[in-house]
Amino acid sequence: MTASTSVAGGREPGAQEAGYEPDPRRWRALWVTLVAGFMSLLDVTIVAVALPTIQRDLGASPAQVQWVVSGYALTFALALVTAGRLGDALDRRRIFLLALGGFVVFSAVCGAAPGIMLLVAARLAQGLAAGFMAPQNSALIQQLFRGAERGRAFGFFGATVGVSSAAGPLTGGVILALASGAQGWRWIFYVNVPIGILAILLGRRLLPRTRRSGRGRVDVPGVLLLGLGVLALMYPLVQAESGGLDRLWWLFPVGAAVLVVFAQWQRRLVARHAQPLLDPRLFSTVRGYAVGAGIGTLYFIGFSGVWLVFALFYQHGLGFSPLRSGLAVTPFALGSASAAVVSGRLVDRFGRLLTVCGLTGVIVGLGGTALLLRFVPLHLAPWVAAPVLFLGGVGGGFVVSPNITMTLRDVPVRMAGAAGGALQTGQRLGATLGTAALPGLFYLVLGRSHDYRGALVTALCAALVGMVASLALAMFDWQRDRRLSQPHRKCPDEVAHDPVHARQT
């Protein structure tokens, strides 16, 4: 029998392999998208180290300056699914280049902003441009690569995602150290301009156009419902430091209710054979998509928040400069980058087992770091913690890249943008929750005990809760894969209709 599933259920019959002709420029095109993606993800965390300087230079309040970080994250997440659907329906190359151009322009406006209000407005627009750009990255990988090459490409993509988050504090510290004067923080934004212009010029030459499929209509009610739901869930989180969780807690059930209405609307469109914004069959019938999205969301709750906690501990607790604070967590970024590239070559062989091993490594690495920083002399803390952080980084490299690959590998190319956008929306929601909850917990413990060590350990243990939940989900999926991949336990009809068995044959 031919190995194929329904269009809704994963691979389009013959469409993803038959007739595929490798683009000779595909690897150079990949590097263009990765550089642009690295910039957009780096800007989530790079600005955090400069907030005290920005607040002082622009005379901003703590609540205003917090919007420089949280506003970017908010509009980034709001745009992802809609941007992915537009890329699928219109042209991923066009959406990517327009979004990259907007990102460059608004980066320049951020750098030149004379006051906090213009800076916040430019950051909101910059985050929106980044959100339109991000889902095109994973969709272009699915469009350009097949088979083992796709795993390698997602390996580089996973390394970009992992390293950009971990390297933000270090990169910000380096820029602040090199840019002399009180206005040095502006170079955190200006550095995007020449890199972005070069990426636009190369992208115009190397990126392929998307074939128009005739499905150009966009589900406007779905866009509004999804946007309102995500906004309601994220707004209290981005306002957490100014009491948003206490004042706006009621938005959580409102957001959940709106998302339920959104899901029902999408099912109605599918039943009417119309084009939904986010096809619900991605979660119900595409093998591995729902589980992978859950793993990514839970992992990013802990993964994203720990870097702010480390920065608070090293800079406020130990008096480190932003550069030295960034260097202290660099071992994690190095381990993550090296492992993510390798894991892309191994995912077809080991599957979900890679994610299980990776999450175990992250839990051991961060848990060991928490214990060491709790008991070793403070002046030795960064040196003693470095090897264990490196181990955690290696584990992280075996989480992000394989999970992205296994989550998206059976998604039809025509739905790649929306699927990638939804996956990254979950990650952004998890990251926003983590960056709100973990520093808040750090300050809560610190205010009661005035113990920086205790505050750090408590926050890291909270991060580990999300990672343990992610590990449990990964182990469940791994065991299910093992059961489904043993055809001798099934009758011939079951084996013939098993999508995992079909994919392997």
Image (tube, grey):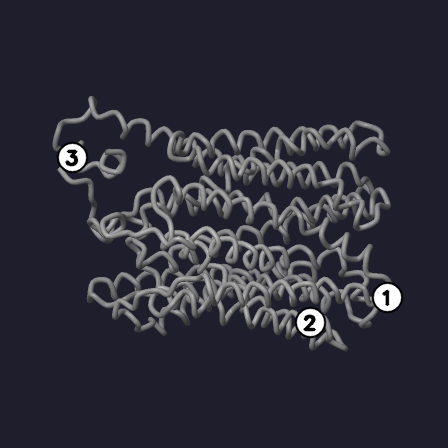
Query: What residue is shown at x 20% (from left), y 44% (from top)?
Result: 4
Query: What residue is shown at x 73% (from left), y 75% (from top)?
Result: 113
Query: First in sequence: mark 1 or mark 3?
Result: 1
Query: First in sequence: mark 3 or mark 2?
Result: 2
The location of residue 57, given as percent across then percent down, is 83, 69
- Count neighbours of disc 2 (C-alpha within 10 A) and say few if under 14, some if 14 to 19, many if 20 or more: many
Q: Which mark is residue 110?
A: 2
- As displayed, is residue 240 above or below residue 373? below
Residue type at mark 1 is Ala
Q: Is residue 330 left or right of residue 148?
A: right
- Count neighbours of disc 1 (C-alpha within 10 A) and say few if under 14, some if 14 to 19, many if 20 or more: few
Helix, strand or loop at mark 2: helix
- As displayed, is residue 405 above or below residue 504? below
Residue type at mark 3 is Ala
Cβ atoms under marks 3 and 2 closer than 8 Å: no
- As displayed, is residue 350 above or below residue 35? above
Could one spot residue 37 in this view of the protein?
Answer: yes
Helix, strand or loop at mark 3: helix
The location of residue 291, given as percent across then percent down, is 39, 42
- Count neighbours of disc 3 (C-alpha within 10 A) and say few if under 14, some if 14 to 19, many if 20 or more: some
What residue did someone put label 1 on?
A: 182
Compute the Cα span from label 3 to label 2.
57 Å
Residue type at mark 2 is Cys
What residue did someone put label 3 on?
A: 496
Compute the Cα span from label 1 to label 3.
68 Å
The location of residue 224, given as percent across then percent down, is 41, 72
